[in-house]
Image (tube, rainbow, N blue to C red):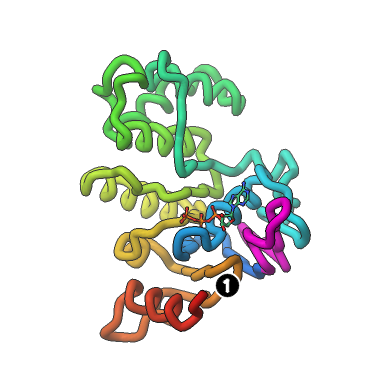
Amino acid sequence: MAPAVEVAKLVKHYRGSHRGLNGIDLTVGEGEVFALLGPNGAGKTTFVKCLLALLRPTSGSISLFGEPAGNPGARRGVGFVPETPRFPDFLSAQEVLRLHGRLIGLPHDDLKLRISERLEAVDLTDAPKRVKAFSKGMIRRLALAQALLGSPRLVIMDEPTADLDPIGRRNVRNEIAGLKDQGATVVLNSHLLSEVERVSDHVAIVHQGRLLAEGGIDQLVPDGQDLESVFVDLIEKAGN
Ligand code: ATP
């Protein structure tokens, strides 16, 4: 069976600079919860955008479930929670999800039920009428509902718990655990290392576009330490 994500020799340089990604090799197995960690500017969002084929790599290859990342077949099975979600502010949460459901071709009969289930899961059933009146945390919860509407087999989340209160963070954790139970794969970026430690099976630490360390939480974090101290140690040793 092909892995959920297979990245080989991935380089992405932005025009006129050598910033971005400088040769990443990484495999994420189907059903894993994988977290990509790194300091600001390490290349995490660049990595996510390459997986989503929103950015074209300078070189190297990426496949999702054995298909090149840009192929429609590979993209169909992916749900995405962006770092800064934006929705038309004149729509309601239901209308946002209805629009999204239609765009991804969900059957009409099923859509109403799915939308109410998704809104309930992210606690937005009684949200204000229009997105315009949503708080940042509500927008992020709507983005999660949108990403999961089509029951994707791979869910990519860029900072999914940013702006969320403790209850919102717990809901995201529960969603991730639920996705794992259903056999879906989750790839997430986060700076919240305590959250990552609670939900992830597999972690990679990136710095200046290169992988510094990768493995299971148990392999990376020795007894008596936590992920944050391992992270800080590695980044300080790597220097600038
Ligand atoms: P953060 O944790 O701050 O969100 P990140 O790990 O997601 O950071 P990226 O946004 O992937 O980092 O940026 C990686 C590097 O690429 C940084 O040096 C950044 O300045 C650079 N970069 C990102 N986007 C562009 C762009 N559009 N043009 C030029 N350079 C860019």
Pointer 1 local density, CA inside 10 Å: few below 14, some 14–19, many at least 20: many
Q: Residue at x 38, y 17 (%)?
A: 92
Is residue 12 covered in magenta?
A: yes
Residue 178 percent location from the top left of the image: 38, 50
Q: Residue at x 54, y 76 (%)?
A: 212
- Could you say which quadrant of the image residue 4 lies in? bottom right
Residue 26 percent location from the top left of the image: 62, 68
Pointer 1: what residue? 211
Residue in the foreground of this view, choosing between 132 and 226: 132
Q: Above or below — where is 150 with respect to 178?
A: above
Q: Above or below — where is 169 with respect to 27?
A: above
What kind of element bears circle 1?
strand
Toward the front, the furthest residue is 16
Magenta segment range? 1-23
Residue in the foreground of this view, choosing between 235 and 202: 235
Ligand 1 found in image quarter: bottom right
**What's under tag 1, amino acid-wise?**
Leu
Q: Locate the N terminus and report the quarter of the image it occupies.
A: bottom right
Toward the right, the furthest residue is 59
Is 199 displayed left or right of 206 in the figure?
left
